[in-house]
Image (cartoon, grey):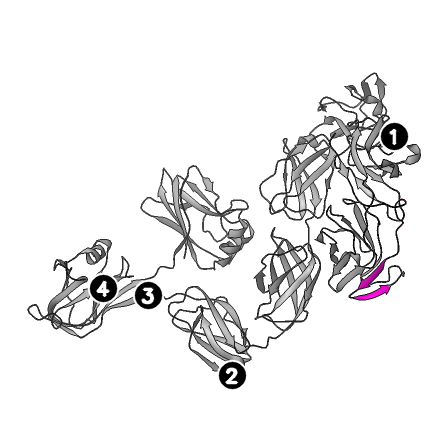
Amino acid sequence: MNKILKLTGAMALGLAVMLPAVLTSCGKEEYDTNQYKGGVNLNVWGPRPVARGGELRFLGSGMDQITSISIPGSGEVTDIKVIAADEIRITVPQDAEPGKVVLHHAGGDITSLTQLSFTEPISLESMTPSPVKPGQTLTLKGDYLNLISEVILPEDVVISEDDFLTHERAEISFTVPEEAKSGRIIISDGGEPLPNWIYSEEELIVVLPSVEKVADMTGVKPGETVTFTISDIDLVKSVEMPGGESVDFVVEGDKLSFVFPENVSDGTVTVIPASGVKVAIATIGVALPGEVVADPATGIWSGDDIRFKGVNMELVTNITFPGVGEAVKPSAKSSTEVAVTVPEGAQSGKAVLHTASGGAVEVEISTLKPETVSYNPDPASLASVVRVSGRNLQHVASVTFGGTATVEVKNPQANGFDIEIPATLPEGPNTVVLALTNGEQVECGAINLKAPVCAYATVLPAEDAEIHAGETVTLTIANGDRLTAVKVNGQKVQYILNSYTLIVQIPSSSGKDSVVTLVSDNGEISYNIAVIPATHQERVLYDGPMIDLNWSGDEGVNKFRIYKEKFEGVPVGGKVVFHVTPSDGAQIQVNDANWGQIAVLEPKTGDTTIALELPAEIRDRIMNSNDGWSDTALIIQGANCVVSKVTGEWELSLETSFWEGNIELPSYTGMTDLAWKDDLCANLFATWKPGQTIRAYYTVAGDEPKLKFGRGEDWSALPGSESEYQDCPASQKFVEHVLTADDIDQLVNHHGLIIQGNHIILTKLTIE
């Protein structure tokens, strides 16, 4: 057998008895033997000496408020096992060194005056045999085992040294009691009040009575006698029916017989040894796992291993965790337990164990939650950085203050993180809700807020306000006397400050996600403001002198050129717009650089403009025709028309693509690339607004082409949809859906977007 555990340290004259706590707190040296006096106080800790890899215990008042413990040579330990408000435990790291320990909590630090010390190198090398049958002799081998006074089997089955068959430095042996169960064993030095407990790394396997195969007793009648062949039948102490009642049984050799009672019901028949572990031998009717418990049932997180224990566990085919739609298969299973790794996104609630027959069993589980949360400073200024401290904070994704302002958390640690308080919150107490990465929320104590000393906004535009690029936005601010500048997307802009009212010019080039920054003489604060971009774009191609077009006139007076550099940025689909004063018979001839005619425009008397459309072939001709000596794009001539200016004009599309590909959806199948992804739900779908349009571009791949916009949770249509499926005629390029507030809530909180289709090829998804 492989080495189980080796512990090193120093021991003199046996193991030391636990001493009362002698501490310094917040730098002041104290000695206090008063037990459990309230607040955060440490009264006793140990054992000292302790084994590396062993368990160190701390008793006192408010111990559940300790967020981390500093161990010499190991740094801070945050993996703290809270037994009760007056007791916590940690595992001593293997690299721990002698010295003083420091307990950290929100109110300060507690430093011990006495030093941590370590035991002799007790080692447990092997335990044989394993599996072992109750009544057999189990032998433990290692070193310094003569210091061990008791062996503790799972569920507090204790074998005292008085019951050891051998007790030497290198060996301990004893008879395995009938009550023994499988699991890790503990060897203990018996020290008072807190002994050293040394756990085996491997589990001891204790033999149970068993059958080769669980019998199917479906259709059995009350009063019938049944017989089972059972290995290790001498261990059987009782036989239990599905309802929990025991029945008399007869043993002959390896055969066990009994009569089904009159009140027998569907379920599992078990045999029970002295240890109380139930072993299924038969099922009656539709079998389900029974008496199922989770181990552990609390403090779990994705990636953790969890075991569900009970009877008939070999029937479990998969497990569904709350918050996770896809079932998880067990990594291992037996008749008494299944093992599984907790999936990403699992939440507190009822885990469901499924069987091949369609049966299901629910088991309550609870995830790891933040505890003992505090803030520093408190009160805190708006727009300032605050330290959030506590335990189990490593999975916090965001913080919502006052029920309105949500801030993303970056790089959270188990014992705390820094976060900036939004500037628009009201002064006074504000609620604090922590959102975890698995979607759960934890409400904490309120934080008190006060106004900042620099200029800041007290009222921002409403979320549905239409703020257009090139126009102004109005903010209500405080501390306006401190304001020195206003920036939009990092560029200084014009503003007017009238008492508490600030009017800011939004540049015409601003995009939909713009940042307005108030710069003061003592700091600055930024706000994200949604801007409607200016869709109409214009570029001057020619701006004077005025040209009176005349076929036979001079260039620069009666005809003129426009050069290629002016067309940079003017897209296909735009227009060349001539600003004109025409008379009867007016004509404008548009030629390329080689005088090749592109078009003749004929404005009417009274017109002020006339436009030339720019399809791809015309723009390509403009940019690529070459006269060999100049950079001419167009040569303009004509008659009976004065041209004062020429502009390039086009419209910006607000439609943006968020998925592109080539996926065929035959026979009402689904495209799930955008479902079950928390980052998309938080960073894409959460930015969408009611009234925006989602479009699905497609090509037809068969009869009756159709498409549905659905939510990831159960593939149902978005609630704002007029029908389950939309028709997708070949004459169209896309179908669209105008989003409602309910639609966006479903996408963000119910696992994203699924596109289902029939006989279509999906090529692109856009939002506008």
Tell which circle, 4 or 3, labels the residue nearer the N-terminal end.
3
Tell which circle, 4 or 1, labels the residue nearer the N-terminal end.
1
**Whole-Å distance between the Cαs marked 2 and 4?**
46 Å
Q: Which residues are magenta?
A: 11-30
Measuring from the top left, give residue 434's x and y in whole percent: 64, 58
- Label 1 sits on what residue type? Phe
Tell me if label 1 and label 2 are in contact, CB under 8 Å: no
User: Residue at label 4?
Assistant: 576
Tell which circle, 2 or 4, labels the residue nearer the N-terminal end.
2
State the predominant SS element of the stretch in magenta. Answer: loop
Judging from the image, what secondary structure is the residue with disc 1 in? strand
576 relative to 293 in the view: left or right: left
Judging from the image, what secondary structure is the residue with disc 2 in? loop
- Label 3 sits on what residue type? His
**Whole-Å distance between the Cαs marked 4 and 3?**
14 Å
Judging from the image, what secondary structure is the residue with disc 4 in? strand
Measuring from the top left, give residue 70's x and y in whole percent: 74, 55
Asked whether 175 or 717 is in front, the reply is: 175
Q: Is residue 77 visible?
A: no
Furthest residue in direction left, as rendered = 552
| Residue 499 tag number | 2
Label 2 crowding class (10 Å Cα cut-off): few <14, some 14-19, many 20+? Answer: few
Q: Tell me if residue 58 comes above or below residue 384 in the rendering.
A: above
Tell which circle, 1 or 3, labels the residue nearer the N-terminal end.
1
User: Residue at label 1?
Assistant: 174
**Whole-Å distance between the Cαs marked 1 and 2?**
88 Å
Q: Find residue 714 and report its image quarter.
A: top right
Q: Tell me if residue 373 comes above or below residue 46 in the rendering.
A: below
Label 3 crowding class (10 Å Cα cut-off): few <14, some 14-19, many 20+? Answer: few
| Residue 258 tag number | none
**Whole-Å distance between the Cαs marked 1 and 3?**
90 Å
Residue 22 belongs to the span the image colors magenta: yes
